[in-house]
Amino acid sequence: MNENFYIGYSPKMSKSLARVVKTFVGLVFTAAIGLVIIFWLGQKPFAKSVFEFGTVKDFTGTIQAKPIPFLLIENSQKSGELPTFSRLPLVAEGKHGVGDEIKSLDGQKVSLKGTLIYRDDLQMIEVVGNSVEKVTQTVAAIEEKPESLGTFTLQGEIVDSKCYLGVMNPGNSKPHRECAVACLRGGIPPLFIVKDTGGKVSELWLLSEQGEPVNSDILDFVAEPIEISGEVSRIGDQLFFKINPARIKRLP
């Protein structure tokens, strides 16, 4: 009888056939481990972005409604005799920008409850509904003129700021496109993400050439590699990019 012939219900297979099976199983296992390692090495790490879901905090500051809704929180450090501020963009819960009830408080000192969203040094507040209250204390008007940095042609990607900063991870690129478009339709301010040759990332708030929202005009270009020309300006620690959406150029 041929000892290499094996029937499944037999109690034991031949030694030579057992060696072949063991070798095959070992090779398959080794190949599987190798593929796992290759995929792991090729996987990009998640960004250091955080959404403090469930942790509601109290904030006090001055509403600056334009060009992007911000809460200006005075810092303990001053610049000479002038106060300095942390500028935190404001969004509503869900896929929505803040409404007129907050924008109508432009220049007013308020207290509000919200949840922090942040990525590296850029922070945002998701405002809890019906939590904004005007502070009766009179405050001096905060006047900060934009500092023009010049006209630039930049390549990058349009994202919705809320997801990008921490609500979703990753909150950019094509897999996130549908969510980003929904957020931008809801009024979430758009960011333009630019990476230089050294890998340093810059985040610029996108506006029209007139300094108005451009959400409805950029939806077709979200999460795609694009090139835009426009004026870059700075207010405090935030960068703004004024563009003409009709001149956006898709990149291959």
Image (spheres, rainbow, N blue to C red):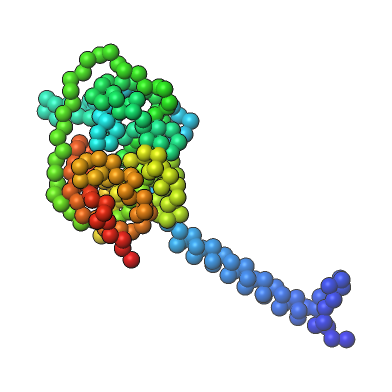
Q: Looking at the figure, which quarter contains the N terminus?
A: bottom right
Q: Is residue 192 above or below residue 105?
A: below
Return the x and y of residue 33 as percentages of the image width and height.
Answer: 57, 65
Q: Residue at x 17, y 48 (%)?
A: 231
Q: Residue at x 63, y 71 (%)?
A: 28
Return the x and y of residue 221 as percentages of the image width and height.
Answer: 35, 54
User: Would you say 12 lies left or right of 162 here?
Assistant: right
Residue 6 seen from this side: yes
Question: Residue reaching furthest top?
Answer: 136
Q: Is residue 184 above or below residue 222?
A: above
Question: Residue reaching furthest left?
Answer: 80
Q: Looking at the figure, which quarter contains the C terminus?
A: bottom left
In terms of image quadrants, where is residue 74?
Answer: top left
Question: Residue reaching furthest bottom?
Answer: 1
Q: Residue at x 33, y 59 (%)?
A: 225
Return the x and y of residue 101 as percentages of the image width and height.
Answer: 34, 25
User: Would you say 22 lies left or right of 73 here?
Assistant: right
41 and 49: which is toward the camera: 49
Return the x and y of residue 152 as percentages of the image width and height.
Answer: 18, 54
197 and 31: which is toward the camera: 197
177 and 246: which is toward the camera: 246
Q: Is residue 99 above or below residue 241?
A: above
125 and 1: which is toward the camera: 125
Residue 166 seen from this side: no
